[in-house]
Amino acid sequence: MNEGMNEVKSAWHHFQQDFSGKKVAVFGLGRQGGGSKVANTLARAHAQVTVFDALPENELREQLDQLESEITVQCGV
């Protein structure tokens, strides 16, 4: 893992924001799955997460399969 990712993980670990019940939008799942990881992290912090992506669902199958079940997804928008 590169040094930059270590800094991001360390910063997130110390982040104490309470996301319980907050509505959060994630725009773009990303080809490398970064958006999926962000959405899952927010869902695990009890946020109400909606993911939006311009690509159709059939082009995002791998990323969609990685999402927590409670995340709402809008594809092709």
Image (cartoon, rainbow, N blue to C red):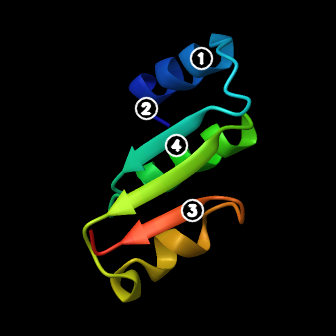
Q: Earlier in the sequence, mark 3 or mark 1?
A: 1
CA gap between label 2 and label 3 equals 31 Å
Residue that badge 3 annotates? 72
The reply to whether callout 4 and callout 3 are in contact (CB within 8 Å) is no
Which residue is rendered at x = 43% and y = 50% of the image?
Answer: 34
Picture quadrant where residue 46 is located: top right
Residue that badge 4 annotates? 38
Q: Which numbered mark, 2 or 4, is in the foreground of this view?
A: 4
Identify the secondary structure beneath mark 2: loop
What amino acid does circle 1 point to? Ser
Left or right of 55 in this view: 10: right
Which residue is rendered at x = 62% and y = 38% of the image?
Answer: 42
Q: Earlier in the sequence, mark 1 or mark 4?
A: 1
Q: Is residue 21 above or below residue 35?
A: above
Within-10-Å neighbours for mark 4: few <14, some 14–19, many 20+:
some
Residue that badge 2 annotates? 2
Q: Which mark identifies residue 10?
A: 1
* Residue 32 shows in the view: no
Q: Earlier in the sequence, mark 2 or mark 4?
A: 2
Picture quadrant where residue 9 is located: top right
Looking at the picture, tell me which residue is in the foreground, 9 or 55: 55
